[in-house]
Amino acid sequence: MAGDGAELTTTSYALLSLLAVQPFTTYELARQMERSLRDVWPRAESVIYEEPKRLAARGYATATVQRAGGRRSTRYSITAKGRRALRGWLDQPGRGPCSNSRACSRSRSPTMATSTR
């Protein structure tokens, strides 16, 4: 669909790639980003905590509020629109050196290619 992904950043796509594997809370997303991408795509945790809200507001993810032991958390899941945008991004050829680059975040994101097909 035209417009899918037009307003997304590389960080958006990195988070969508994680959500393509399974739903996550923002805390879990931050931990996954630290484990899988910190060497090639370091991001401030504040960015990682805010981006899922932006993705949900634009229809690329859904947000489900949960309560556990008196604590409230929001779990994010990728939508069909998010999968289309991610697939379009993955299908683009990478450019440039593998240092804090779109190509590196594409190649290092866990199971991105197989989870979105």
Image (cartoon, grey):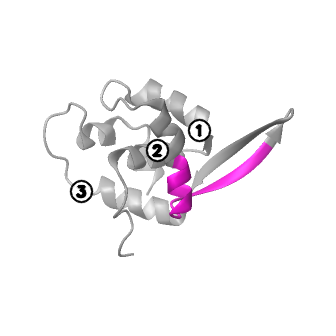
Residue type at the position of mark 3 = Gln
- Disc 1 or disc 3, which is closer to the eye? 1
- The CA distance from mark 1 to mark 3 is 27 Å
Residue type at the position of mark 2 = Leu
> Which residues make up the magenta segment?
52-66
- The CA distance from mark 2 to mark 1 is 10 Å
Query: Who comes first in sequence, dot 1 or dot 3?
Result: 1
Q: Is 57 colored magenta in this rendering?
A: yes
Give the answer, above or below, for where 92 lies relative to 30: below
Could you tell whether 75 is left or right of 100 in the image? right
Report the disc number at residue 41: none
Residue underneath mark 3? 92
Residue type at the position of mark 1 = Thr
Q: Residue at x 56, y 57 (%)?
A: 56
Callouts 1 and 3 close, C-beta under 8 Å:
no
Could you tell whether 50 is left or right of 64 in the image? left
Q: Residue furthest bottom?
A: 2
Q: Residue at x 36, y 71 (%)?
A: 3
Q: Quadrant of residue 14?
A: top left
- For label 2, the crowd category at 10 Å Cα-Cα, with few meaning under 14, some 14 to 19 and many 20 or more, is many
Query: Who comes first in sequence, dot 2 or dot 1?
Result: 2
Query: Who comes first in sequence, dot 3 or dot 2?
Result: 2
Along the viewing direction, whichever of 9 and 13 lies nearer the viewer: 9
Residue underneath mark 2? 15
Q: Residue at x 24, y 42 (%)?
A: 103
Look at the numbered disc 3 and give the secondary structure of its residue.
Answer: loop
Could you tell whether 68 is left or right of 87 in the image? right
Report the disc number at residue 26: 1
Q: How far across and down, in percent of the image, does residue 99 sit?
A: 21, 30
Look at the numbered disc 1 and give the secondary structure of its residue.
Answer: helix
Q: How far across and down, in percent of the image, does residue 35 sit?
A: 46, 24
